[in-house]
Image (cartoon, grey):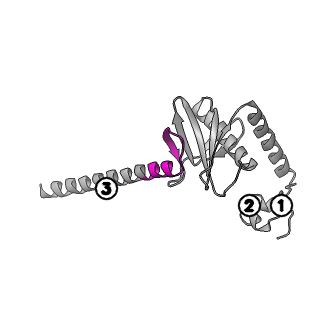
Amino acid sequence: MIHLVAVGSFFFIIAIFVLFISNLMKRNIRRIKDEKNIFSGKITYNDLYKPAKPLYSKILRLSGKPDYIIKQGKYYIPIELKTGKHNKPQENHIYQLAAYCQLLEDNYNGFVPYGILVYNNMHQYKIPYGPKTRFELENTIKKMRYALKNKKIVINHNDIRRCNSCSMRIYCNINM
């Protein structure tokens, strides 16, 4: 009997601990949402603090993990947090966000009207995901696959330091 009380007490303490950790995580997410001034909506996906499952698109043969997904009404919206203080959205960030929009459409079977880029300086950019962006995304992916297949990667900058963490480094013809 004493053994059962001890085991029961142990599981009760574990349950309280799990509840406490869960509340801490919720508060932390709420704090980040407020600090980053992320649009209202329910956070349904978070890849910042705990690795989340990647999303996959059979149509584009592409996978990825946005920083956040929020649900606003009937729409799922990808949110990507970026470092740097930019006065306008960077083209590569727009394509990354567009890829996340397509991933959401393929995984949630619904229309994604836009995604949100949030930079360090707290500037937010609502990037529409319409026919033009879809076409440009598909074209860019085709060009990237062609370049990889033919091993013709062209460097688009003059900063050799950026090459250190580049995933295309093995294909690039730049001498390091």
Amino acid residing under circle 3: Phe
* 169 and 117: which is toward the camera: 117
Amino acid residing under circle 2: Cys
Marks 2/1 in contact by CB < 8 Å: the verdict is yes
* Label 2 sits on residue: 166
Tell which circle, 1 or 3, labels the residue nearer the N-terminal end.
Answer: 3
Query: What number is the disc on residue 172?
Result: 1
Q: Residues within 10 Å of mark 2 (few under 14, many from 20)?
A: few
Taking the magenta stretch, the answer to whether it contains residue 38 is yes
Q: Residues within 10 Å of mark 1 (few under 14, many from 20)?
A: some
The residue segment tinted magenta is 28-46
Q: How far is disc 2 from disc 1 in space, using C-alphas? A: 10 Å
Vertical arrangement, residue 175 with respect to residue 80, above or below = below
Amino acid residing under circle 1: Cys
Location of the C terminus by quadrant is: bottom right
* Label 3 sits on residue: 17
Tell which circle, 2 or 1, labels the residue nearer the N-terminal end.
Answer: 2
Q: Give the residue at x 85% y 69%.
A: 175
Residue 70 x/y as whole percent:
53, 39
